[in-house]
Amino acid sequence: MRIPPLYLTLLLSMLGLTARAQSPAPATQTDPRKAQFFTQDVTNFWRAFDAWQTGQPGNPFAELYYKPASPGARILLEKNGLAHPDSLLRVVQRRHADYARVRPATLRMAEAIPQCKKAFAALKKLYPSAVFPPVFFAIGGFQVGGNSVALGQLVGAEMNDPAAIAPLVTHEAIHAQQHIPYKYKILLEQCLIEGSADFLAELVSGQPAGGANYDYARGREPQLWREFERDQNLGEDDSFALWLYGGQRPAGRPADLGYYIGYQITKAYYDRASNKGKAVREILNIADARQFLTQSGYAERFK
Ligand SMILES: [Zn+2]
């Protein structure tokens, strides 16, 4: 995800979005086998889409998609700027071919659920205090791929390949366990939050962390570290664009290289720890990012 979960939650609650859901929020689950995954909204979307395509008068999305929507789908729609069914109808009118193209993939989202539950179970074994917020699959307007909010995880099914779901959901599930105070409000902290989520997701899912950022970093680690060492104390008024959350970057430089750096620091910390269970607890509860970096011994590799 691109927006720090704390900010997103604050933002949503300021907008009154988290409180407006009609049905009560599902309880956060402590048993990974009982973790909840909601896919009905995807089915409902296509029911409405077909009704629209076959010429049902009015706006079928109002009755068939918005009215029965889960609380997660409501938030996802709001985050897409589609709080009103007529806004969605306008997007569908403009982009119906794009929707039709992704339809088969959206209907296969449920295939990822067993893999997610397997990763959740592995996480529980590694970290017995783990909790599992519900996961909501819904369809928006090609704006939001995934986000964590107080209610749980939201997945924009129209923006994801089924194969990418388990890594995404596992990464977000790690965020749900993190208690990492944003103490110094610096780049290093954000990169540790993201990179350690990637690292632990890899550990519990067995799927290596990857993406354009990891591909780019291969063979460039010393150079990237030197750049990061210079930038690690960038604060809230500075641009994080070279490392996180999009923005202007030099040509050829991928987004989110900060995930890679955070991953490597976390891995160094974990690798040198003799008690791995304790290390996982510490990684999920990094009280002081600067101290964690020192204790990881990562920087010493480049001296
Ligand atoms: Zn994240």
Image: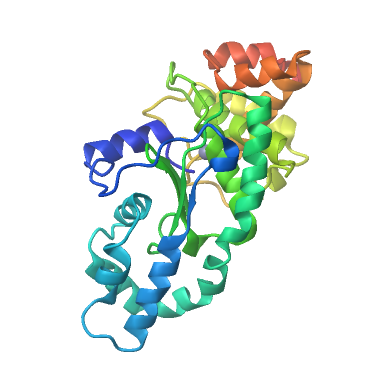
Which residue is located at x 73 percent, y 30 percent? 222
Name the residue at 47% across, 42% down. Answer: 245
Instruction: Reply above or below: 214 against 106.
Output: above
Q: Is residue 209 left or right of residue 34?
A: right
Seen at 36% across and 85% down, the residue is: 53
Instruction: Please give left or right for residue 189 compared with residue 268 in the image.
Output: left
> Residue 209's spot in the image, x, y percent?
69, 42
Left or right side of 130 for 236? left
Q: Is residue 158 above or below residue 21?
A: below
Who's the residue at 21% across and 80% down the image? 58
Task: State the image quarter where residue 24 is shown.
Answer: top left
277 is higher (above) or lower (below) than 133 = above
Residue 37 pos. (x, y %): 50, 50
Viewer-nearest residue: 162 or 220: 162
Rendering coords of residue 219 (x, y %): 78, 40
Residue 117 lies, in percent from the top left, at 62, 44
- The answer to whether residue 78 shows anywhere in this view is yes
User: Is 64 or 280 nearer to us in this picture?
Assistant: 64
Colouring mode (rainbow / by chain / secondary structure / one colour): rainbow
Would you place residue 95 above or below residue 283 in this image? below
